[in-house]
């Protein structure tokens, strides 16, 4: 869950990349407006048990699992330039600058005391 998120995250893509990549979409309310962010989880050994395209993921859902050989997971947050219409784009299109741009994860991850 991201700071200010409304509702559950949605799985947009599960696919190859650096091992397995899972992409989730999050709606963030900012005043009277809202923005959509996508979070890339790269380097997973396998996706979580309920992770499939179109699935809703609650706050404590398992996105994926890491392996013993390479336990490093890369997390990237991107803000969508406009809401997605229709079927989710491909993994490659989601990473492209035409649909989204990178943001610092510290701007959207919840602060913990």
Image (cartoon, rainbow, N blue to C red):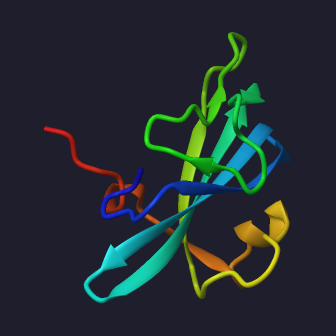
83 on left or right of 55: left
- The residue sitting at 40% across, 70% down in the picture is 28
Residue drawn where x is 68% and y is 10% of the image: 68
Position of 70 relative to 108 (above/below): above
Where does the image place residue 21, in percent across and percent down from the top left?
A: 74, 44
Percent from the top left, x then y, of residue 70?
69, 20
Direction from residue 93 to residue 109 in the image, left or right: left
Front residue of 51 and 102: 51
* Coordinates of residue 51 in the picture (x, y in percent): 71, 40
State whether residue 71 is above or below residue 30. Answer: above
In the rendered image, the residue lying farthest to the left is: 113
User: How many numbered marks have been drawn onto this rendered protein structure?
Assistant: 0
In the rendered structure, the answer to whether residue 55 lies left or right of residue 73 reads right
User: In the picture provided, is 101 more to the left or to the right than 97?
Assistant: left
Observer-nearest of 112 and 29: 29
40 versus 42 height, above or below: below
Image quadrant where one finds the C terminus: top left
In this picture, is 85 found above or below 66?
Answer: below
- In the rendering, at what x and y percent does residue 16 appear? 86, 44
Residue at horizontal 74 percent and vertical 74 percent from the top: 96
Residue at screen point 69% across, 35% down:
50
Q: Quadrant of residue 13?
A: bottom right
């Amino acid at each position: 869950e991201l700071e200010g998120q409304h509702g559950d995250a949605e799985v947009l893509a599960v696919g190859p990349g650096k091992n397995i990549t899972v992409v989730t979409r999050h709606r963030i309310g900012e005043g009277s407006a809202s923005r959509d962010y996508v979070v890339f989880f790269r380097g997973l050994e396998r996706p979580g048990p309920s992770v499939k395209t179109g699935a809703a993921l609650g706050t404590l859902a398992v996105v994926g699992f890491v392996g013993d050989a390479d336990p490093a997971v890369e997390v990237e947050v991107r803000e969508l330039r406009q809401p997605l219409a229709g079927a989710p784009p491909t993994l490659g299109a989601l990473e492209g600058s035409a649909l989204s741009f990178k943001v610092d994860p510290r701007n959207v991850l919840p602060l913990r005391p």
